[in-house]
Each structure stands twice: as C-alpha cells, then as structure tokens.
Amino acid sequence: AQSVTQLDSQVPVFEEAPVELRCNYSSSVSVYLFWYVQYPNQGLQLLLKYLSGSTLVESINGFEAEFNKSQTSFHLRKPSVHISDTAEYFCAVSDRDSSASKIIFGSGTRLSIRP
Amino acid sequence: GAVVSQHPSRVICKSGTSVKIECRSLDFQATTMFWYRQFPKQSLMLMATSNEGSKATYEQGVEKDKFLINHASLTLSTLTVTSAHPEDSSFYICSPRTSGIDTQYFGPGTRLTVL
C-alpha cells in the first residue's frame, strides 16, 4: 500500500518569494506521483505529474517538482509566487504496476500568499 | 481538457433522508469511476471504485449499504447517501478515469450538509 506525507499543513509566504511544498511518499512498488491544486471553492485540478522519463516535471504556471527516488520525495517548488497561487495543494501517489491503481492523497498544504 | 460535472453542487437535507449525487463525464467515456469524500480541512479519502456495469468495490470502513454507487453507463455515475446523518456531512467528489492513471479527472464536488 502507498502513503503520502505532507509535513506542512500551512505555508505562508510573501508575494514574489520562492516556495517549496514538501511531499514524501512510501511504497513497496514503483509509483506515479502527482500534485493537485484546489483553489478556494473549486474542485481539484491536476498541476503536474511524474509518470516516467525526466525526474523534473513542470507546470504551465511556473511550478516544478522533482522525483527523488532515493529520498522518496516529490517536493513542489516555485521561484516566485503570486497572490493567485493561494490554494490548497495535494501531493498524491499511485501504484504504476496495477491496472486498477488508486490515487492516494496526502493531507494537503495550504499555501497563503501575503502581499 | 476533460469536463466533469456533478449535480447538485450543494445540498442540505434532513437527517434520515436520502440524497443522490450525479456525476457526468461530458466529453469522454469513463470506464472506471472513483468516489472520494473530503472533510473540512482534510484530504480526499477514497470511498469506492466502480467499473461500468459492475458492482462497486468499497474501501475499508465505508458502508456499502449506506453509500450506494451506480455506474450504469460510461458517462454517468451516481452516489446515493441513504438515511443520511449529520456525520455524513462532507464534500463528495467523483473522479472518472478513461484508461490509464494519467486520464483520471475530478468533478467539482458536491457539498452535503445533513441537519
């Protein structure tokens, strides 16, 4: 079984500052990794994903995450945040070896941007 | 991108009544449907998985007789909360998948409040 740990429940940062949201996972098999974003009063949206290939993946709005197998991490980073990045961010993992794999979510990190 | 709708977006009901939530994939066919529940300030917890035309598989601790899932077609799935109680108040999210893990999408959610 897989599990995801997001150690930071809240991360406050100033606008234009860099941010890192931490994510560690546990699994006995190979995994797919995801970051989802949930803006206030909206549904979940896929931000970026690691399926295979390059361990560094990027989103269209400047976020990136790097899959580190040895550290079992998939931290999310952005060099300069905007007010519009205020949201809840969920790291998620799925078993890549099963056709019936389920996406398991972390507890979420609330990113609040201060002007 | 793929469009998923849920209806209703919000529902308030009295304790003891049943509530049906519809989930539709508007521009793709969902071979598998996942239903999640999200309590305030918590992560998404998988409730059940269903394949079109088959009975749903429920996660441990989720009562199958209380949360009835129907996946009668490739574009429609329903979740019925039977004899709802205040502790069932939550945010319910459907998540249809077409084929692989990277083709799983999320509905906007339904907020259920049981008085």
Image (cartoon, rainbow, N blue to C red):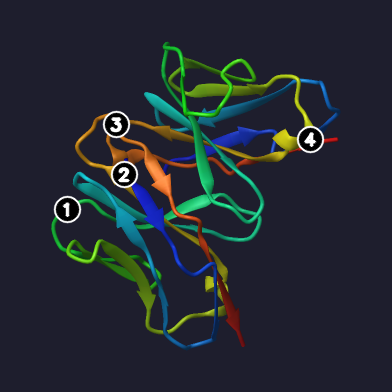
Rate crowding at label 2 as few (under 14), some (14 to 19) or many (20 or more) other CA atoms within 10 Å: many
User: Residue drawn at (18%, 61%), measured in percent from left and top?
Assistant: A69
Same chain for the residues at labels 4 and 2, yes or no? Answer: no
Q: In this picture, is A32 found above or below B71?
A: below
Q: Which residue is mark 2?
A: A94
A29 left or right, relative to A62:
left
Q: Amino acid at mark 2?
A: Ser
- Chain holding disc 3: B
Label ID, residue B86: 4
Amino acid at dot 1? Ser
Q: What chain is tagged by disc 4?
A: B
Residue A52: mark in rendering: 1
Q: Quadrant of residue B113?
A: top right
Mark linked to residue B74: none
From the image, tell me which residue sits under label 3: B99
User: Is label 2 or label 1 in front?
Assistant: 2
